[in-house]
Amino acid sequence: MNNTLLFTQKYLKYNYMEEEPLLKYEAFWTAVMAALQLILYYSAAIGIWGLALKKSIFWFILSGAVLGLIISLLFVSPVVASQKTKGRIQDIMFASSSMWGGLSIIIGILGITVWIIRVIFF
């Protein structure tokens, strides 16, 4: 076998032994909290678009919540719930909130920009 592969396998084996293991309910509740975080982000971001377009804010917030739920159920919660150590779950939570949370912030900032342009010029 390749020496690099053996070193990598040995390193991963010791690395997992050093990290603190996670209980099943901890991984589950962390996944739930990640889903709630994304639901809140997308509800706020798309709710701002309801304000910018002068439509029913309630329906925009509701559609943002559904979008956040779909994203979290498809891409975030299964990955977070399958982690075995606290270090890995922290890394996954940071990555998911950076990737999907950043997208919702961009959507919200674009909505605020449209709302400001609409208030000033129209």
Image (cartoon, grey):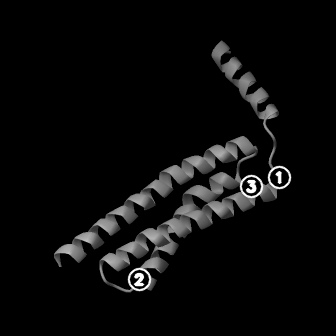
Q: Quadrant of the N terminus?
A: top right
Q: Considering the numbered disc 1 on the image, is that residue within a helix, a strand or a loop?
A: loop
| Residue hosting label 2 | 57
| Residue hosting label 1 | 23
Front residue (pair 72, 60): 60
> Label 2 sits on what residue type?
Ile
Residue at 17% from the left image edge and 79% from the top image edge: 122
C-alpha separation, residue under disc 2 versus residue under disc 3: 34 Å
Disc 1 crowd, CA 10 A, few/some/many (<14, 14-19, 20+): few
| Residue hosting label 3 | 27
Residue at 78% from the left image edge and 36% from the top image edge: 19
The reply to whether the C-beta atoms of the residues labelled 1 and 3 are less than 8 Å apart is: yes
Q: Considering the numbered disc 3 on the image, is that residue within a helix, a strand or a loop?
A: helix
Q: Nearer the viewer, mark 2 or mark 3?
A: 2
Residue at 78% from the left image edge and 27% from the top image edge: 14
C-alpha separation, residue under disc 1 versus residue under disc 3: 7 Å
Residue 23: x and y in percent read 82, 52
Q: Which residue occupies the extreme top position in the image?
A: 3
Chain-order first, disc 1 or disc 2: 1
> Label 1 sits on what residue type?
Leu
Residue 106: x and y in percent read 38, 58
Residue 29: x and y in percent read 73, 61
